[in-house]
Image: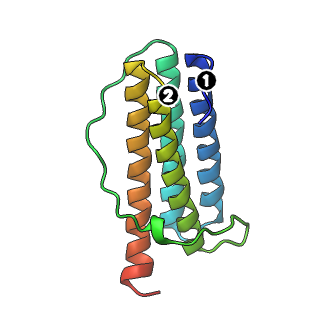
Amino acid sequence: MDTFESVDALLNFAMEKEEEANKFYLGLAVKMEREHMKKVFTGFAAEEAKHKEKISAVKEGKQLMPVEQKITDLKIGDYLVDVPAGPDMDYQDALILAMKKEKASFRLYTDLAATTEDSTLQSLMQGLAQEEAKHKLRLEMEYDEFFLTEGY
């Protein structure tokens, strides 16, 4: 991982990643036929926007609450083949792509936490990693329910 020349550079990078994630989920929401998943992806987009607000608050000097708990990882996404993003993605491919993206975001924030000695930044990055883990868990549960349990 690259090193950051300043705390602001690290925070700006993290805010850019959250903005990208927000746009990604809004794009997926538009493509979904199932109203339930439109709402899920729109909700994820809103959560990514909140993550950006948290990062911005730290940038402005505000303190955040420490990480509450570790999130269970079903690891379903770890065993699925990568799928390309495209306008004709089906529901299953959208879930797989989103799971992979959340796993990458979790790793990013875990790695970012390791790049700093600042306890506030470490706490922020660890907290964001856990938020991304929650997203992945929700996606894995959805995948399990519709594609593993029901045997699609």
Residue 2: percent from left, percent from top:
62, 32
Residue 144 lies left or right of residue 111; in this view the side is left
Q: Is mark 1 on a helix, strand or loop?
A: loop
Amino acid at pointer 1 = Phe
Spot occupied by residue 85 in the image (x, y as percentages of width and height): 69, 64
Q: Which amino acid does label 2 sit on?
A: Thr
* SS under mark 2: loop
Instruction: Name the one closer to the observer, 42 or 58.
Output: 58
* Residue 69 seen by the camera: yes
Q: Residue furthest left?
A: 69
Mark before the other along the chain sequence, 1 or 2: 1
For the residues bearing labels 1 and 2, Cβ distance under 8 angstroms: yes
Image mark for residue 52 = none
Residue 124, above or below 95 = above
Point out the residue furthest to the top here.
61
Residue 115's mark? Answer: 2
At label 1, counting other C-alpha atoms closer than 10 Å, the crowd grade (few under 14, some 14-19, many 20 or more) is some
Quadrant of residue 148 within the rendered picture: bottom left
On the image, the x and y values in percent for residue 62 come to 42, 15
The residue that appears at 43% across and 56% down in the rendered structure is 136
* Residue drawn at x 64%, y 43% as measured from the top left: 20
The residue lying toward the viewer, choosing from 96 and 35, is 96
Q: Residues within 10 Å of mark 2 (few under 14, many from 20)?
A: some
Identify which residue is drawn at 58% across, 66% down.
Answer: 94
Of residues 132 and 81, the one nearer the viewer is 81
Which mark, residue 4?
Answer: 1
Instruction: Indicate the position of residue 115 as horizontal and vertical percent values.
Output: 49, 28
Q: Which residue lies furthest to the bottom in this view?
A: 151
Instruction: Please name the colour scheme applied to the rendered image.
Output: rainbow
